[in-house]
Image (tube, grey):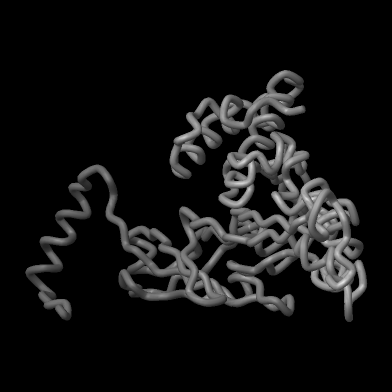
Amino acid sequence: MARDPYQELGVARTASADEVRKAFRKLAKENHPDTNPGNKAAEERFKRVSAAFDIVGDPEKRKKFDAGLIDADGRETAGGFGAGGFGGGGFGQGRGGFRTESFEGADLGDILGEMFGGGRGGRGGAGGGFGGFSQRGADTRARLEIDLEDAIRGGKRRIAFSDGRTIDVTIPKGAQDGQTLRLKGQGAPGRSGPGDAFIEIAIAPHPVFKREGESLVMDLPVTFYDAVLGGKVEAATPDGPVMVTVPKGSNTGARLRLKGRGLADAKGGRGDLFARLVVVLPDAPDPALEAFAEDQKAKRPYSPKRR
């Protein structure tokens, strides 16, 4: 049998849900297989704290464990059938005797199904059989944050579940923020087979590109000289750097459109990338540029539009 989950997480039985979550996060971070490659002890510890959190981190399971209805492995205990169980006259009165009238108009499967939460003998439930005795494993849910580049091109990422399992998730090309991936048979184990895993995709903020629908927007620094004279400058894109043409007389705020360099959509198409020009002066003072500016200010004064 597994160790007491409260002891495994190092929390008191009176710990709040938030305290339990904080304890699990700390231990999971310290013992995660990705941060302890090849460390079997850390891997085993990670599995134990994950299993413990699966019990006390779930309000319903925690309530059952505290009441002695399930053990530290999540299995029903001998007293888990309640006062109306097999040994206490659960099917009738007296010492385990059946009361015939209880089954009029119904079969044994119906009665067992009602008692153990499986509908009509569990036949309408997820796992079939006698309700809780032969249920399909629970579905599990997780959130996976991915890079913008992975959302566009697709890729693989590893994710860890609270029960200690790790699986590789294939990210499809054109993955959308908020999209949920269904991994069949990757959920919690059960007597009639495992449930499914549902992975919600979240695209992480990017240091260069900002999302606007299926388009991307970025700032593109350009020199004073390129802004005045025009020229070719290098611009970053999710697919790698490209050269773009800056028109003569460009001002800060002007946008260049890079067609098909934005986010991918669900159908495999691509939005556009818009580069917002930002005119940048030299870091160090330039006497020649200052003299030119003084001369032009005297000869060709102008007032920019102010909003």
Quarter the C terminus occupies: bottom left
The quadrant holding residue 164 is top right
Quarter the N terminus occupies: top right
Which residue is outermost to the front?
94
User: Residue 35: percent from the left, percent from the top?
Assistant: 64, 28
User: Residue 21: percent from the left, percent from the top?
Assistant: 51, 41
Q: Is residue 237 left or right of residue 198?
A: left
Residue at image location 45% in from the left, 70% down from the top: 246
Q: Nearer the viewer, residue 136 or 276?
A: 136
Q: Is residue 96 left or right of residue 56?
A: right
Which residue is outermost to the left?
298
Q: Can see residue 146?
A: no
> From the viewer's perspective, is residue 146 above or below residue 273?
above
Residue at image location 70% in from the left, 50% down from the top: 83
User: Residue 297: percent from the left, percent from the top?
Assistant: 11, 68
Q: Nearer the viewer, residue 256 or 5?
A: 5
Q: Can see residue 111?
A: yes
Residue at image location 71% in from the left, 61% down from the top: 198
Residue at image location 7% in from the left, 69% down from the top: 298
